[in-house]
Amino acid sequence: MSATLDRRDLLKLLSASVLAGPLQLTAAEKDKPLFFSPDEFELLDTLTEQIIPTDSHSPGAHAAGVPFYIDRTVAEAFLPDYKEAWKTGLAELNRLSFEEHKHPYLKIGKEKQLALLALLAKAEQDPKTAGEKFFALLKEDTAYAYYTSDIGIHKDIEYKGNVIQMEFAGYDAV
Amino acid sequence: MLLQFPGPNPNEVDLKSTYDAVIVGSGAAGGMAAYVLTSHGLKVLLLEAGKYQDTSKILHSMEWPYDHPRRGNKPPDYHALTVNEYNIRQQVAVEKSPYPKVQSYVQGWSGTDYSKTLVVDEKQNPYTGTRYAWVRSRAVGGKTNIWGRLALRLSDYDFKAKDHDGYGENWPISYSDIEPYYDKVDLYLGISGHPEGLPYLPDSKFQRPNKLTYSELHFRETLKGMGRVVTPYRAGVTTEGLKHNKYRSRCYGRGACNRHVGGCDIHAAFDSPTGLIRPAWDTGNLTMRTNATVYEVTVDKDTGKATGVSFLDSESKQSYKVKAKSVILAASTLESARLLLLSKSSLYPNGVGNSSGHVGHNFCEHMMGPSVSGFMKDLVAKPRTLDDGKPGGFYIPRFRNLEGQKPSPFLRGYGYEGSSGTTMLPSSVSTPGFGEEYKKHVRDYAGATIEIGAFGEVLPRYENAVDIDPDVKDAWGVPVLKFSYQFGENERKMAKDMATSGREMFEAAKFEVLSTSDEMLPEGWSIHELGTARMGDDPKTSVVNQFQQCHDVKNLLVVDGSTHVNASCQNPTWTIMALCWRSCDHLADQLSKGEV
């Protein structure tokens, strides 16, 4: 077997890697939510960072642009149900916060916020109440957006693949 | 002589001339028929219902999720059918879906923006009857553009299965008949694997094998003690390159084949367009007409022979007829059966080639669903290694109902496909919790996971069948298929055993088991439908002979999976191509002698 890239293969690899320009957002657009109100977006930003925070190993959801990705996804969703689930879910979280602590979620302090999330997270596998269902939605969308991001793939998981290899890595079957 | 690939249609097709062969469908079978027949110097017309799409340009195998506006996912107005929707009746789910574009379940995976034009729109292509997760591609190359690549041989355990357990019928051929053709397919298309010397899973002419991960190597050692085998994925992928094919590169272990629905933009993985059709094109003997929806095999009512086919232009819906000395159906197991059944005439009132009444019957496939997932404790919190840069994980060949073993409570066997280690996207959603602890858990376990999923033989049964539903028509006005097909008791017993034996192997390897499932996924999930026009020596109980010629009409061949007598538990693509090569050699010989 040849250990060098032959020219023909190299040309094929190069032509295959020419990407069709994706609809990249400009810097200005990136700063502005398309679907959520400024208040909702602030809440979303806090929540996603609490689901996947910055730690000593890697940056978290905020740095990875998770709230913006979720905002774009919800904004272009085809069915109103999904948009509705996000709107009412954020409202439900504030309602629960008011009920327990007389203030909206962003005003109750980190300790009470995390306690409230932990309560909703208990039923993650089989959510029943509106709050539990919202947690499941928040968790799923945050995890997907984070682990498909540049930071999630490279800085957190430290994924080493999607590269050109002359030999497969690993162990021979003996 | 056309200079463009493919021809710009439709006037390029000479409707006045008589081709040596007209082939319907351009997937594994149709591509192989085109390659073999044009290599024999025959003038061939290849008809494909879909368009030509250059997968070199559309698959973007190395694009990072974050470089795509939807992280590789399909546009918001596209919907993929779910298990629940198949369960509540696919037809209802499709008709009532609010989404403009509805596609089969495979488009529910990540990264499906790249494959959305390769699979059919379910609204345009309805079907009725029992639930069936039917995945179809109408494009040059068909499902080979995105196939799973596991390229296995069958053995006499399959060809002579009736001799082993008394069930069903033997094939009219033995392993020794097809072995030289398996060799030809291996050498012409390239296959990666490690020889194991197993009588029930014959070795191929392998190129450089995949490597195993640390946990897979440990699993292999463990299973040796149980008389079972973990072997590197036998992939229909050229890992060393093919000097005779300038359209395909060798594999460079980029690993995208498991991240998207499949497909390889440098064509290291076999696909029909670059592996077979372009070489056929280069002979100068091939004419290809895309956007050609064939709806009937035409026959001469005096001689009873096939005279050609009728087709509609898929866009203008204008009807055309073409003439050929031989007609070769390679439209896929279910579509070829549909065509035979649609081609009714006074001479063939039950459909052409169907005097036996077996067309559409003995429908079989592979059952999927039972699976085990877990992790290897030694690997938790270890640095992540490069584990997915290869064309597949590993395969565990069948180990039930073999010579000298105590018979299982079910007939036949099953194998497992498996994978392990770090992938681009960790299993983050299924990890419970949130916060720092959650994040660390996802990271620590990302490289430690291992999972296996079973593929089991579904017995061929006469009563498992498809027929024409005269009341429902597709977007081209062609009557659709009605399914009467379901798993039976043998499959249910096998599913239980799959889960039990999978768990037992994980425990033997001291893997921590996270989940075990013995639930069968809906019928059709494996995308390995087979057996609706089975081969045999007896024209009363089979549709085609050992050279895939209809018993009733010798110049009408069916060369796809519909001719398989049973499903085996081994993936069918390589067998489809080996049989097709053998039949086309035979046909070319007969045509040269004027015998058909």
Image: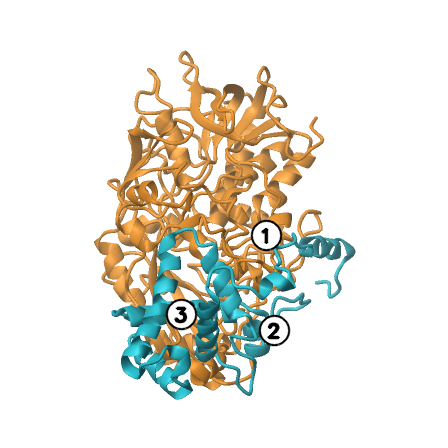
Chain colours: A cyan, B orange
Q: Is residue B93 visible?
A: yes
The amino acid pointed to by label 2 is Lys
Residue B59's disc number: 1
Q: Name the one closer to the observer, A27 or A12.
A: A27
The amino acid pointed to by label 1 is Leu
Asked if residue B537 lies left or right of residue B41, the reply is: left
Q: Residue furthest top?
A: B302
Q: Residue at point 47% right, 80% down?
A: B439
Q: CA distance from mark 1 to mark 2?
A: 21 Å
Q: Name the one closer to the observer, B294 or B433.
A: B433
Image position, residue B164 (x, y; %): 31, 54
Placement of B511 over or under B358, stated as above or below: below
Image position, residue A27 (x, y; %): 64, 64
Which comes before the other along the chain, label 2 or label 3? 3
Which of labels 3 and 1 is toward the front?
A: 3
Placement of A116 over or under B368, stated as above or below: below
The tally of labels here is: 3
Q: Residues within 10 Å of mark 3 (few under 14, many from 20)?
A: some
Image position, residue A106 (x, y; %): 42, 79
Q: CA distance from mark 2 to mark 3?
A: 28 Å
- 2 and 3 marks in contact (CB < 8 Å): no
Quarter-wise, where is residue A138 in the image? bottom left
Q: Residue at point 28% right, 62% down?
A: B519
Residue A138's disc number: 3
Q: Name the one closer to the observer, B560 or B514.
A: B514
Subunit that carries the residue with mark 3: A
Subunit that carries the residue with mark 2: A
Residue A160's disc number: 2
